[in-house]
């Protein structure tokens, strides 16, 4: 058995699923930067799209059964926490997907194997690949294996930094904080946003994030810290 085949077998052992179609596994692990000519269809992007929706459905089902007294609002908050990119990236690290990724040289040298966005995307792609390979039951088993313990943890604080800052401003008769995108850098598939939040008579506070929302949350957290308000640890 080749080294690559051994590595893929070890990955299948870690995730608790053996692929009938090995090409699906390869595609789930292939970043567009590794493909000549930028053939998106041969990368994990289509599988990521599918996996994102399968993940949402399976976790919604898990939450519905695990929390029979929870109302729709609580279930929605729990779902959002479990399917967020940061959680998917944590799962990818638990699966040790980083070393298995197929990246172009520039992306690899830039630290792509550790990048939250890429890890989250490939995690969703893997869910999609399992779904295509064996159907809902197999995807449900994979997701339960890696998300069930996370699902049963206490729900994160309900107020995010943007909500906290808006409440702080309103309590002092200030207008709603205004957010302004300052810059967007990085490649199209993995951008970084820099956003400023503005309140009257105060210097702007800035934040960075891999989405505009995440950058806004970071900016709000920076402003709250500046005015002496403790911030709940919630990512964008």
Image (tube, rainbow, N blue to C red):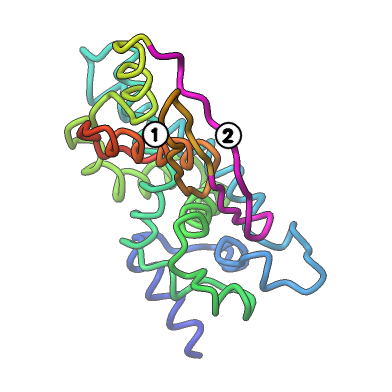
Q: At which x and y percent is residue 164?
A: 31, 23
Quadrant location, the C terminus: top left
Which residue does the image show at 22% across and 30% down from the upper left? 155
- In the rendered view, would you say 113 is above or below 48? below
Q: Is residue 13 left or right of residue 212?
A: left
Does residue 96 belong to the magenta stretch?
Answer: no
Question: Which of 169/110 is in front?
Answer: 169
Question: Which of 139/236 is in front?
Answer: 236
Q: Is residue 102 left or right of residue 92?
A: right
Q: Secondary structure at mark 2?
A: strand
Q: Which disc, if any, is residue 180?
A: 2
- In the rendered view, would you say 55 is above or below 104? above
Rounded to the nearest whole Å, what is the CA distance between mark 2 and mark 1?
12 Å
- In the rendered view, would you say 42 is above or below 218? below
Which residue does the image show at 22% across and 31% down from the upper left? 229
The image quadrant that residue 84 belongs to is top left
Q: Is residue 191 left or right of residue 15?
A: right
The segment highlighted magenta reads 174-194
Q: Which disc, if any, is residue 207?
A: none
Q: Which disc, if any, is residue 220?
A: 1
Q: At which x and y percent is residue 127?
A: 48, 49
């Amino acid at each position: 058995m080749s080294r690559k085949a051994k590595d893929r077998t070890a990955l299948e052992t870690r995730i608790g699923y053996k692929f009938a179609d090995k090409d699906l596994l390869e595609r789930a692990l292939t970043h567009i930067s590794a493909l000549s000519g930028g053939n998106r269809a041969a990368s994990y992007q289509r599988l990521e799209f599918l996996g994102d929706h399968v993940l949402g459905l399976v976790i919604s089902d898990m939450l519905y059964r695990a929390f029979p007294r929870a109302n729709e609002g609580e279930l929605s908050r729990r779902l959002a926490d479990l399917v967020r990119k940061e959680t998917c990236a944590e799962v990818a690290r638990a699966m040790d997907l980083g070393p298995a990724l197929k990246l172009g040289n520039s992306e690899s040298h830039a630290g792509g194997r550790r990048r939250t966005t890429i890890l989250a995307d490939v995690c969703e792609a893997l869910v999609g690949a399992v779904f295509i390979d064996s159907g809902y039951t197999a995807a449900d088993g994979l997701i339960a294996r890696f998300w069930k313990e996370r699902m049963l943890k206490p729900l994160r604080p309900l107020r995010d930094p943007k909500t906290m800052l808006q409440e702080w401003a309103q309590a002092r008769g200030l207008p709603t904080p205004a957010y302004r995108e300052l810059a967007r850098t990085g490649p199209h598939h993995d951008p970084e946003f820099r956003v400023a939040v503005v309140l009257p008579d105060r210097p702007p506070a800035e934040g960075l994030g891999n989405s505009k929302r995440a950058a806004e949350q970071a900016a709000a957290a920076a402003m709250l810290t500046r005015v002496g308000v403790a911030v709940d640890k919630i990512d964008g």
